[in-house]
Every structure is written in structure tokens, then in C-alpha cells.
């Protein structure tokens, strides 16, 4: 995927740096080669490599199709440890989630908030890798909420309104729905789970607790299971 700023005129794109190395070493690309391309936030198509040297590449591009539809879902995710966050950012973009809100919880280790993965650039890079994997051009919007209670009391009720709002909670009586129509929101807890007070706040804001089965899953597994279920095409 290329950014609009890399475009030159109507059909030329000049890219530089790390991605040029990737083109050469991973794709084994050489002038004349055709590649799948897309403009971040825009359309998808094909590119033909016109030139490639150590530092930059020039492509002729034709953009002819829209990216796949998004999953109209707000994901409220208790901030995971950095190693897990890296994988989850990719997965969230692969599923086409429209908005990701990383929240604090009593059981989130405070040091996780120091992670360099939370810089705008790192978030962008990992989401971009997921979007590219899924042949999508649009990245989820990301917000960070370092205080759970003000988020849950002041912001979450409005987000839940007009959406089917859920919190994944081991032991919940209701199962997580499959392929529900319309806008969604789901909250996923930290490794040690949301505490009872936090679950109470989530419910007060409008989130219904739902189960993903009788097994307690890692937050990472729960996230993929929930998005797979909520985002599955209707039969
Ligand atoms: N002991 C914690 C508890 O009971 O909440 C376990 C937390 S689990 C490792 C991490 C997160 O993944 C949970 O907060 C929940 O959001 C989600 N999760 C894991 N297994 C689940 C299940 N079977 N049903 C629903 N949510 C689940």
C-alpha cells in the first residue's frame, strides 16, 4: 500500500526506504514486474515497477477496485502485553475492524503503557501489515484510554447506543452471536480478566456479557474467536 503523498501525477508512485528493500528481497521484484497495489484509504489495483534502485522505486499504477467492506465493529480491548499487542494489531486490521480502543483495567500491567508500540508510527505500521495481508486499504481508527472508569462512564454509553454491544466474559449465560447484522461493539478483557467492578461498569454502559464457550481462552485467542464469529458472513 502507498500513501497519497507518494503519488506523482495521476499514475506514478515513488516509494522509498524499508519497503523498497522489501520489494527487492521478499518479492524479488525487478523493473517490469507487476504487483498488487493499493492507496491507503483508497482503491486497489495493479502496479508495474518502472525502476528500482537501493533507495527508491517508481511504479506505474492503475487503481480499479474498491477495498473489501469493513466490519462495522468497535473493539474495546484491555491493553495486552506488547508481544501480544503486535499480533493483535495485525489481526484487528485483517478483520477490517473499524475502530480499536485500547483501554486500561486494574489488571493491565502499568508498564504496558510505556510500550513503544503505542506510538502513532508503530500502531500505523502494524495495522498496515494486517491491512495488506487482507488486501484492504483502510486502517482501523485507534484511541488510547488510560483511565477505565471515565471511559466506561462518560464515553462508552454513547458508543453502545445504536450498536449491539457485548463484553466477552467467561461463564456468561448467553453465547456470543454469530454474524449479527448492524453495528457492533465488543469488549475483551486483560489476561486476568476485567474485575467485577469493571464488568459492572461495562454492563451499566450497555454491554451484554457473552460467552465464547466453556474453555477460558487467552485474550488473544478470545479476540480472534470473537471477531471470526461476529464477522463471519451470514449463511
Ligand atoms: N480468569 C479470567 C476471567 O475469568 O475473566 C480469564 C480472563 S481470559 C484469559 C482473558 C479475556 O478473554 C477475558 O477477559 C474475556 O474477555 C476473554 N475470554 C476468554 N475466554 C472466554 C470465554 N470462554 N468466553 C468469553 N470470553 C472469554
Image (tube, rainbow, N blue to C red):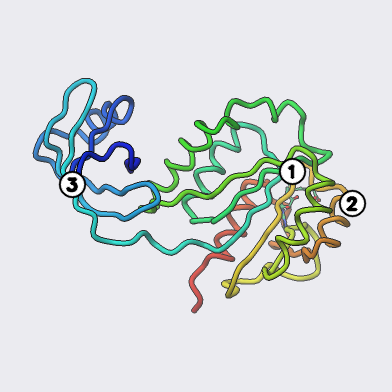
- Asked which secondary structure carries label 3, the reply is loop
Residue that badge 3 annotates: 11
Disc 2 + disc 3, Cβ < 8 Å? no
Q: Residues within 10 Å of mark 2 (few under 14, many from 20)?
A: few
Residue that badge 1 annotates: 190
Disc 2 + disc 1, Cβ < 8 Å? no
* Residue 30 percent coordinates (x, y): 13, 33
| Up/down of 147 relative to 113, above or below | below
User: Separation of disc 2 and disc 1 at Cα?
Assistant: 13 Å
- Asked which secondary structure carries label 1, the reply is loop
> Relative to the observer, which residue lies in front, 2 or 224?
2
Q: Residue furthest top?
A: 54
User: Separation of disc 3 and disc 1 at Cα?
Assistant: 46 Å
N-term-proximal mark, 3 vs 1: 3
Q: Nearer the viewer, mark 3 or mark 1?
A: 3
How many marks overall? 3
Residue that badge 2 annotates: 196
The quarter holding residue 229 reads bottom right
Q: Which residue sits at x=31%, y=24%?
A: 17
Q: Residue furthest right?
A: 197
Q: Which residue sits at x=13%, y=41%?
A: 33
- Asked which secondary structure carries label 2, the reply is helix
Q: Which residue sits at x=62%, y=31%?
A: 82
On screen, residue 53 versus residue 126, left or right, reads left
* Residue 56 percent coordinates (x, y): 22, 26
Amino acid at each position: 500500500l502507498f500513501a497519497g503523498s507518494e503519488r506523482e501525477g495521476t499514475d506514478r508512485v515513488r516509494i522509498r526506504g524499508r519497503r523498497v528493500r522489501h520489494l527487492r528481497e521478499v518479492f524479488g521484484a525487478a523493473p517490469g514486474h507487476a504487483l498488487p497495489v493499493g492507496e491507503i484509504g483508497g482503491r486497489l489495483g495493479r502496479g508495474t515497477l518502472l525502476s528500482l534502485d537501493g533507495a527508491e522505486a517508481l511504479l506505474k499504477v492503475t487503481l480499479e477496485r474498491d477495498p473489501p467492506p469493513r466490519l462495522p465493529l468497535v473493539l474495546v480491548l484491555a491493553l495486552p502485553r506488547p508481544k501480544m499487542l503486535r499480533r493483535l494489531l495485525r489481526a484487528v486490521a485483517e478483520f477490517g475492524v473499524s475502530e480499536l480502543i485500547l483501554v486500561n483495567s486494574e489488571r493491565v500491567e502499568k508498564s504496558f503503557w510505556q510500550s513503544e508500540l503505542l506510538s502513532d508510527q508503530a500502531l500505523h505500521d502494524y495495522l498496515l501489515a494486517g491491512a495488506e495481508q487482507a488486501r484492504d486499504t483502510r486502517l482501523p481508527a485507534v484511541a488510547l484510554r488510560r483511565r477505565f472508569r471515565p471511559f466506561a462512564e462518560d464515553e462508552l454509553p454513547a458508543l453502545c447506543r445504536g450498536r449491539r454491544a457485548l463484553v466477552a466474559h467467561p461463564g456468561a449465560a448467553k453465547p456470543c452471536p454469530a454474524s449479527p447484522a448492524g453495528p457492533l461493539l465488543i469488549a475483551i478483557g486483560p489476561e486476568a480478566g476485567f474485575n467485577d467492578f469493571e464488568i459492572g461498569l461495562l454492563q451499566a454502559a450497555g454491554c451484554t456479557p457473552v460467552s465464547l464457550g466453556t474453555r477460558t481462552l487467552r485474550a488473544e485467542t478470545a479476540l480472534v474467536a470473537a471477531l471470526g464469529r461476529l464477522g463471519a458472513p451470514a449463511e
